[in-house]
Amino acid sequence: MEKQLLLGDEAIAQAALDAGLSGVYAYPGTPSTEITEYIQQATAGSNIHSRWCANEKTAMEAALGMSFAGKRALVCMKHVGMNVAADCFINSGVTGVKGGLIVVAADDPGMHSSQNEQDSRFYGDFALVPMYEPSNQQEAYDMAYAGFAFSEQMGEPVLMRMVTRLAHSRSGVERKAAQPQNGLSFSDDPKRFILLPGIARKRYKALLEQQGAFVKASEESPYNRFIDGPNKKMGIVACGIAFNYLMESYPDGCEYPVLKIGQYPLPHKQLQQLADACDEILVLEDGQPFVEKQLKGCLGRGLRVKGRLDGTIPASGELNPDIVAHAIGKENKAIFSIPSLVEMRPPALCEGCGHRDMYATLTQVLKEEYPEHKVFGDIGCYTLGANAPFYAINSCVDMGASITMAKGAADAGVHPAVAVIGDSTFTHSGMTGLLDCVNENTPVTIIISDNETTAMTGGQDSAGTGRLESICIGIGVKPEHVRVVVPLKKNYEEMKQVIREEINYQGVSVIIPRRECIQTLARKKRTK
């Protein structure tokens, strides 16, 4: 087949299509967004499902439903999305699957656009399911292409872990022959998806009994390779993209024995081979010390294992070729250096953004009239309200936490307690928090800053567009306290008056400043 120049994300998407995909389920989140966008563009008008989901939990559950019907499904999310999807993801290991199911978790070491550096491999280990971790774009394609059949063979979902650098860099990828979609079919065990305790105990025992088969598959996997080297003073375990970083220091082959890891659980035979041959082991992995911790426990000997835990590799941050070179006793000399006059420019809200007008009025009212105020922020473009010139929010923890943290603060006696959340984040995970507020008539003011899109990740569809007022009223907010304003300078006085009135109301109120994102509006005008 022909070669294509693809992002790592696009390689996964194309592989899924070539492998007979019937549906992709996802919520946008950097660095995973391009997988679903690529499928949407490639399948417009087809019978392959590719609409965005309300959140990662609904995505995981819908994909499991498609697998239940015997068809191949792909679930995509960033690493913190795994926290939202975890309930279904963990239990999917117990139910197993019928149609092939691949869950892509795109991790963000270095926190380029995230709240933490969590490593999704721990989720795969927790769920006791097989995992892939590609080292390059071609492997990402090959793993996804073969992964659906492997999932069906093992009867389990497969977790594929990506990292930002691989997801967002391009390389030539050779495609394989396209396969047709699966037809409808169902499990021979009609009770496997009914996790009543009596059934779940049997299913969990069966999952435990499969662990040996998963290890054997890893030991026989083409993605796990032992590469011998003459210098036995040290052996190197290189996971995923770390293998590429290692090879940059050794273009003609590494002097040390290397175990390249691309599939989990860890291949016991190859690990034993490396341990038997070498005096100590260095673990290179992007993210947290997942393999390093396992090696310290599973080798059963006094062999020294080096990595993030002992400081050989920095405990946090993204892995790169320079860090790897330093760990093996080499020093890469940078060809280019950053001039001292170049300074990092912090991100800022776009000029003309409706969020700016919302913050301009909100901060003026709060700072001048309510000095004891606290504002609880959320995940989205509007989180930048924490920076100059607004300095408007006091918290940003996770998707949807603005409303529930405001509720807790109000319960503690804080007034006014204000939540700022975006339209997409509200439908992702803010609605249940609003229901808690309504059930207790908590005196909170909730601002749903509606730009009619999921702007932070590029302007994907927002699940609540055109329905926010109906949702809030349906949850139980009194209609007279669901207020819509247009965030423009000419409306500042009206907006400030609405804010005052709803802060002074001793109950749940929702203000919706609504104006389309200027970036999506500009794109629409260019396409006309």
Image: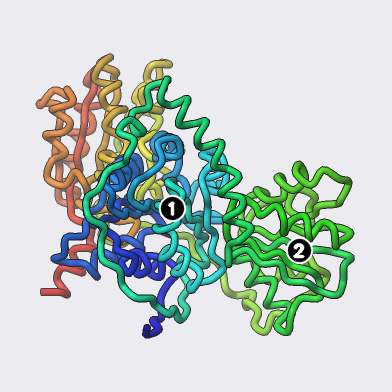
> Alpha carbon of mark 1 to alpha carbon of mark 2: how far?
31 Å
Kindly state the secondary structure of the residue where label 1 is placed: helix
- Image check: 34 left or right of 302? left
**Residue at point 44%, 78% (across, down):** 173
Nearer to the camera, 454 or 478: 454
Quadrant in which residue 279 is drawn: bottom right
- Give the quadrant of the N terminus: bottom left
Can the viewer see residue 354? yes
Mark 2: few, some, or many residues within 10 Å (few <14, many ≥20)? many
Vertical arrangement, residue 242 with respect to residue 249, above or below: above
Mark 1: few, some, or many residues within 10 Å (few <14, many ≥20)? few
Q: What residue type is disc 1 on?
A: Gln
x then y, percent, for residue 382: 34, 48
**Residue at point 31%, 72% (across, down):** 178
Vertical arrangement, residue 471 with respect to residue 299, above or below: above
Can the viewer see residue 389? no
- Image check: 114 left or right of 282? left
x then y, percent, for residue 201: 47, 25
x then y, percent, for residue 502: 21, 27
- Image check: 413 left or right of 437? right
Q: Nearer the viewer, mark 1 or mark 2?
A: 1
Residue under numbered circle 1: 153
Kindly state the secondary structure of the residue where label 2 is placed: strand
Q: Which mark is residue 236?
A: 2
**Residue furthest front in the image:** 188
